[in-house]
Image (cartoon, coloured by chain):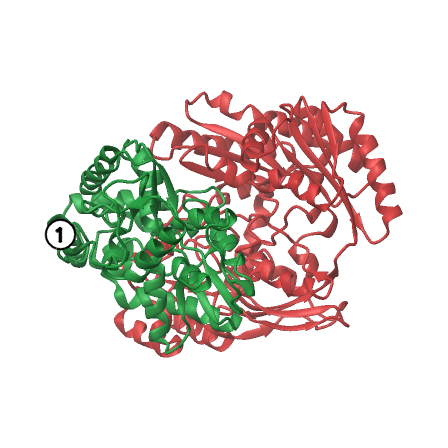
Amino acid sequence: MLLLRGLLYDAIELTDTIKNRLYFCSICGICKEKCPPGVDTPTIFREIRENLVEHGEVMENHKQVLTNIQQANNPFGEPHENRLAWIPPDIELPETAETLYFAGCMSSYRTKETAINTVKLLKASGIDFTVSKDEICCGSVLFNTGFTGMAKEFATTVADLINSNGVKNIVTSCAGCYRMLKMEYPETFGLKLNAEIYHTSQLLEKLINEGRLTPNQMNMRVAYHDPCHLGRHMNEYDAPRRVILSIPGIELVEFPESRELTHCCGAGGGVRSAFRDYSVEIAAERVKQANELGVDAIVTACPFCALNLRDGADLIKQNIPVFDLPELIVKACGL
Amino acid sequence: MSYNKVTDRLIKELEHIVGSENLTTKPEELYCYSFDGTIQHHIPEVVVRPKDTSQVSEIVKLANREKIPITPRGSGTGLSGATIPTFGGIVMDTTRMNQILDIDIENMIAIVEAGVICDGLNAELAKYGYCFPPDPGSSSICTIGGMVGTNAGGNKALKYGVTKDHVLWLEVVLPSGEIIKTGSHVLKSSSALDITRLMIGSEGVLGIVTKVGIKLTPLPKYTSTELFLFDAVAAAAKAVVKVRVAGIVPTMLEFMDLPTTEATFEYAGLEGYPEGYYLLLECDGFHQEAVESEFTKAVEFSMTEKPIYYEKAEDLKHRDKLLSARKSALPALSRLRPTTCIEDCTVLVTKLPEAAMKIEEIPSQLGVEGFGLGNFGHVGDGNMHPTFFFDERVDSQREAFYKALDILYKDIVIPLGGSITGEHGLGIVKTPYIGHELGSTVKIWYDIKKLLDPNLILNPGKGKGGPYPLVCE
């Protein structure tokens, strides 16, 4: 914040070092959480990045992400036509349904097990759902790296898709997509979605309570990692925990920094794109915490957190499984 | 005063002492070290982070030899500008010296390095049922060394005293680089000139504190707390006078004026209270009957000023809720305007009503739109923190701030026989007023300063180091 003050008052120049500092923030929001006056640092960082982008001060990797999204509707530049390739061949989905599963880019192209396991659970529970072949990036990474205008364009397209489909409910397994759809779309972009937005953890809790999913005994000691976008940003700490605790035999252990004070996995805010090594080192610190707790596995509720935590475990050569929540529940339900 | 610049050769020598990873000349990092908790700032030429006393000594010897100014700094939360490197030079960040070296419960003494955080120390001591009582608002961040530098107080200073009342001895690096220990490792000694208390509150102009020998205090077992709201500042202040004149020494008597109470109650989520001036009374101790007896008398005296509301804490959770408003005074006020400057003054308790009323009038006296005041403080010992909020980017408001300081110190506090600082120190901000408070006495400080620091390298430009008038870059 002092650096921003210095730039504002022309006391210091924007050097590459300062630019890197301004982009080397996952916008996790823990500073805002701890700040006594509650300075809204995440919003300030987003706005300064918007300003940097306007002046052409963009990280090279973020430029590539932007190009990828513009050309292929996902940050990886993978062919758009492959977006639904993760769907198992034995799972048939209707053209239309009451509930739309929004897989998100990460689950569609990288951590496919999140999407696959989610649809297995939805199928097993008898939910009337489908996915859309027209699904594109929700705009989260663009929004957090200063490409606000482009983020709004994609958000508008996604909103039109949802509203034209007549769906009543949207379910997403990605904490970032959940945050965008539920909060940023209406509050920042003025886009009203004519559907209820749920994170997978919230729907899973409902399905388990209704007896539509029945987890079996699973003797395991796990620590739950709160994703920043789901926990601190959207105030959802308990649904994932209740889902985990619904598994007989599970012992849930809290990280020393959890809930409002969760230790960011290091991936968000464009950090993994632009500073891969540092991002994974941050994740490794979280894995070290898990090791000190003596848990059998880490459970999280975000495919991006899962990805980075797994890379963090690999970095320090720790063979500790990292489960995204749908994967854990599929195992528990024997699906 | 003039000093030499830090050269590349000197940087290499400093790197040799602390390691290149503990030294920086990066502009963006130097800029961050330019600030403390005030609106003052000045950029240093280099920042070093020594690990131990010997490194501090080597750095100081080098600076003395080369006539480079050094500004010692803990966490940088000071509220008077004492850690601003007004002449550039070296900033010495002491936060790497952060070890609790010894806790000797049987003898009720602890030894800590200067960079230990106050709350961190108290978290350790609490395991044994003891504490280091000074509790400034920044206790979660501030260092013990910084507290020694300003003779920090806090909410409980009324009963438990300030930093100097709990320090037995110091390890100090003098401006020559010589390392001294200022006192004896016992609870009571009369064997030495009291260099310990000369150093405490000297704001880093006489020496750099590296270790602190602390006297421990048992944690009290019983606490009684009551909130009062009054409809006039005079009533709240008179309640304080009555309690104190009766010879009662509560643990806390904390005050907030109307704007501060409104801002803090909203911040802390306290709803359903009438608008009023806040006074929190607390007594603590080891014997419940004694605590209740003293507390009841204090409440009786407070009630004679007819509060419009009162609420006794039923338990510690309730107490924390009532106190949370007071503890959030600065963060709550800092949300009102872009710039917040907290001041610090002390008057005799019997002068409190007059001082509080006059302070309340400062914004209307200046009549500048956008310039406001919230007053709060540890009124049990007459210590208040008038806090000005404004926008420093607006010329009229920034000018109003400096006029407000003149009114506060020259027209209100000093004529009432008060002191321009109770616990924040002189630093830069209050230096212009010290002559008005203490007259020619301050010249002796410069004689002492010259004796210990003939090259004037240690924290120059700060009030307690002289000379007067000070000239800053």
Q: Position of residue A290 (x, y in %)?
A: 47, 69
Q: Chain of mark 1?
A: A
Q: Position of residue A9 (x, y in %)?
A: 28, 43
User: Quick check: B407 left or right of A287?
Assistant: right
SS at mark 1?
helix
Q: Which residue is mark 1?
A: A72
Q: Position of residue A81 (x, y in %)?
A: 13, 53
Task: Please say if B80 is above or below A190.
Answer: below
Task: Please say if A149 is above or below A66.
Answer: above
**Residue at screen point 16% across, 56% down:** A82
Label 1: how many Cα within 10 Å (few below 14, some 14–19, many 20+): some
| Closer-to-camera residue (A194/A120) | A120
In the picture, which chain is green? A
Give the mark count.
Answer: 1
User: Quick check: A97 left or right of A66?
Assistant: right
Q: Quadrant of residue B106?
A: bottom right
Q: Position of residue B166 (x, y in %)?
A: 69, 60
In the picture, which chain is red? B
Can residue A297 be seen in the rendering of this structure? yes
**Residue at screen point 49% across, 33% down:** B388
**Residue at screen point 26% across, 59% down:** A90
Which quadrant holds the N terminus of chain B? bottom left
User: Quick check: A178 left or right of B371?
Assistant: left
Q: Looking at numbered disc 1 in the image, what kind of residue is underneath it?
A: Ala
